[in-house]
Amino acid sequence: MKPRVLSGVQPTGNLHIGNYLGALRSWVKIQHDYESIFCIVDLHAITVYQQPEELRSKILELTALFVAAGIDPKHSAIVAQSTVPGHAELAWLLTCVTPVGWLQRMTQYKAKSEAQETIGDGLLQYPVLMAADILIYQANCVPVGEDQRQHLELTRDIAQRFNSLYGETFVMPETYLPAVGARVMGLDDPEKKMSKSEPGAGHAIALLDPPGVIRKKIMRATTDSNPAVDFETMGAGVKNLMTIFQAFSDWTDDQMVKHFSGMRYGDMKKQVAEMVVSSMEPMQKRYHEITSDPGYVDRILAEGRERVNPIASSTVNLVKQRMGIYTSA
Ligand code: TYM
């Protein structure tokens, strides 16, 4: 039996090249080496208020984008998290073995709760639900961007604590980070991670941005006071553009240095923009083909649910038995 891979994306805002380079691209690369499950984590999205109609349409958009980016739905299960009830059920069972101090220490919780007037309990519980997403499928490998590393460590801590309290139950999942592109920064502010929730028009490149918009955003990206590329002294903005180019091109460090050293920023930006545009074009074309068949995305999600629900139910059953909760014979 192949080992299992699991990952997820929240259906909020517009998917951007950070999400693609940090996560989706790894999924596409490794999907056939594993039994693969990729989730649209709608239960995570509602930890902060989402406009209901928009959330519904984002779930469908994200499913189509997964396929357009190269996830093969014949091989990999694409699942809307809320359609598999075991995720929420296991999250509760795991909540009961998770010290609240572990959750209060999470940097994403601290950052997100600062922006809220009242902090919903869901925001604190968020990483427990994420642990449930992973542990429910006994996933061996979790491909994510750098910002999820701490949540993955917590997942292993929760699994270990459960195993030591109730006996070996969960597989320990490994974090899989891409060599280049694990942390893509904002174009307008390279000190901040590129984020779906950042409102600035020049901050992120969305996967569905038209070529003209991509070019404009890259040409306006923040650089520094040097006139040309110098790999020894470059600031965070230029470094980020170089990372974006290298991740899309798969060039080696040597190739990057030889090609870009001494190149004026205007010319360098044009080349980065063309690299991003040409990488996005096939994905965007496929996205428009997929969405022209209105029932396609619903069929994919129904198939994904059918495939994974039995795995989820059997883990929840095992966990209940281990904990001594009543399970029918
Ligand atoms: P989310 O929706 O914020 O992001 C989806 C994926 O994109 C990666 N990512 C980035 N990678 C590189 N540079 C960036 N600027 C960047 N921004 C985001 C994220 O690391 C992530 O891999 N909690 C998760 C969703 C989740 C999940 C899971 C992931 C829920 N359950 C189980 C893995 C396994 C999140 O909010 O991702």
Image (cartoon, grey):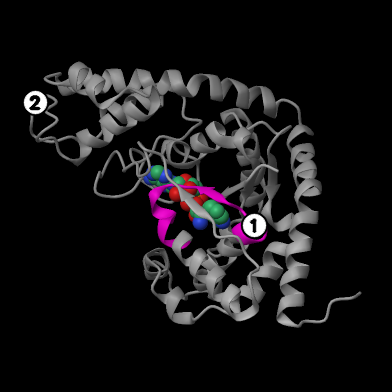
- In this picture, is 115 found above or below 137? below
Segment colored magenta: 133-151
Foreground label between 2 and 1? 1
- In this picture, is 157 found above or below 71? below
Q: Name the residue carrying label 1.
A: 138
The three-letter code of the residue at mark 1 reads Gln
The quarter holding residue 225 reads top left
Left or right side of 325 for 250: left
Residue sitting at x 22%, y 35%: 239
Query: Toward the viewer: 193 or 315?
Result: 315
Residue 216 visible in rendering: yes
Residue 136 located within the stretch drawn in magenta: yes
Q: Please give the label number shown on residue 103.
A: none
Residue sitting at x 55%, y 60%: 172
Residue 226 located within the stretch drawn in magenta: no
Q: Please give the label number shown on residue 227.
A: 2
The three-letter code of the residue at mark 2 reads Pro
Residue sitting at x 60%, y 80%: 165
Q: Quadrant of the C terminus?
A: bottom right
Provide residue 56's location: percent of width, then percent of height. 67, 49
